[in-house]
Image: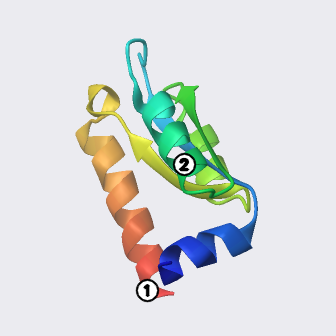
Amino acid sequence: MSAALEAARAEGPKTHRLFGYPLHGSYASFLHNTITRLVDVPRTYSFMESTDMDAFLEYVRSDECAGSAVTMCVFSPKLFCVFYCWIRDESAS
C-alpha cells in the first residue's frame, strides 16, 4: 500500500469541497466519493455552491479541510490573485 494512502487513512475523517457557482450537472462528488470509498480513505467530497470567497477561505483554513477545487465558471482575475497569494503564502511556511 502506498504511503500517501496510509497517511490519509491515519488522518481520519476530512472533507473536500468543490467551490463555485453554478455546480449543477457536476459528477465530481460522485466520482471522488466513489474513489475514496473504494480505497478506504475517510473523506467526503461535497459541493460549496457559492461565490463567497471569505466563506471558502475560512473552510480551506479549517482543520476539517483536506482539499478543495474551484470551478472555472467563477474564476476571475481577482479570484486567481487571491488563490495565487494564498498558495504562495502557504508554501512558504
Q: Which amino acid type is shown beneath numbered disc 1?
A: Ala
**Whole-percent x, y for residue 92 in the image:** 43, 86
Task: Give above or below for 83 relative to 48.
Answer: below
**Whole-percent x, y for residue 12 in the image:** 75, 64
Seen in the image, is 77 located left or right of residue 51?
A: left
Name the residue at the top extreme.
24
Secondary structure at numbered mark 2: helix
**Whole-percent x, y for residue 7 in the image:** 61, 78
Q: In which quarter of the image is residue 81?
A: bottom left
**Whole-percent x, y for residue 40 in the image:** 63, 56
Dot 1 alpha-carbon crowd within 10 angstroms: few under 14, some 14 to 19, many 20 or more: few
The residue under the point 63% across, 39% down is 55
Between label 2 and label 1, give the one nearer the viewer. 2
Tell me the tag on residue 49: none
The residue under the point 44% across, 64% down is 86
Residue denoted by label 2: 38
Q: Which amino acid type is shown beneath numbered disc 2?
A: Leu
Task: Give above or below for 6 relative to 69.
Answer: below
The residue under the point 26% across, 36% down is 76
Dot 2 alpha-carbon crowd within 10 angstroms: few under 14, some 14 to 19, many 20 or more: few
- Say which of 3 and 23 sits in front: 3
Name the residue at the bottom extreme.
93
Q: Mark 2 to mark 1: distance in Å?
A: 34 Å
Task: Give above or below for 40 relative to 88.
Answer: above
Tell me the tag on residue 92: 1
The residue under the point 48% across, 46% down is 35
- Say which of 91 and 39 sits in front: 39
Seen in the image, is 2 located left or right of residue 62?
A: left
